[in-house]
Amino acid sequence: MALPFLNGKMDLSSLEGLSDLIAAQTEEQRKQALSLAGGYLAQHIDIWRKSLIEALSYLEADLDFSDERDVENSEKTETYAIIQRLKEDFKHALKESYRGEIIRNGVSIALIGAPNVGKSTLLNK
């Protein structure tokens, strides 16, 4: 397993992944922890950061050259496209984080019912 290092240090999400790997009890937990420890989340955050910087540069260009008619007005279109992509990426990441929490923490269930109706048999199966 290759762990991401920057100046000899791991980032927070990679450390959390390493901690999750140590505590993993199932194969799915182990896979998820390896992905996190390997820098999966850090890579996405870096991509989002670069996209935000790009959108900001388009906005600044639009402000700086707003009075010049010979400069194309594509900055607003580019900015909007970047923001829309980020919005979709964030929605997807939030859905995945919910799934990841279930894998990481498991789910709690309660089997309730009258005595001798098969609760223990169901649990044992």
Image (spheres, rainbow, N blue to C red):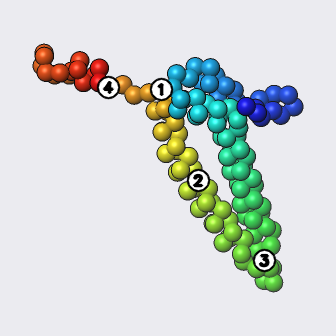
Residue at the location (75% across, 69% down)?
62
The answer to which of marks 3 and 4 sits earlier in the sequence is 3
Residue corresponding to mark 1: 105
Taking depth in this image into account, of 4 and 78 the one nearest to the observer is 4
Residue corresponding to mark 4: 109
Residue 104 left/right relative to 47: left
Disc 3 + disc 4, Cβ < 8 Å? no
Mark 2 to mark 4: distance in Å? 31 Å
Taking depth in this image into account, of 26 and 79 the one nearest to the observer is 26
Of all residues shown, which one is farthest toward the top?
A: 115
- Marks 3 and 1: which is nearer the front? 1
- Marks 3 and 2: which is nearer the front? 2
Label 4 CA crowd tier, 10 Å (few <14, some 14–19, many 20+): few
- Marks 2 and 4: which is nearer the front? 4
Residue 27 left/right relative to 58: left
The answer to which of marks 3 and 1 sits earlier in the sequence is 3
Taking depth in this image into account, of 82 and 34 the one nearest to the observer is 34
Residue corresponding to mark 2: 89
Mark 3 to mark 1: distance in Å? 55 Å
Callout 4: helix, strand or loop?
Answer: loop
Label 1 CA crowd tier, 10 Å (few <14, some 14–19, many 20+): few
Residue at the location (53% across, 29% down)?
27
Q: What residue type is labelled 1?
A: Asn
Q: Which amino acid does label 4 sit on?
A: Ile
Disc 2 + disc 4, Cβ < 8 Å? no
Mark 3 to mark 2: distance in Å? 34 Å
The location of residue 54, given as percent across then percent down, is 75, 59
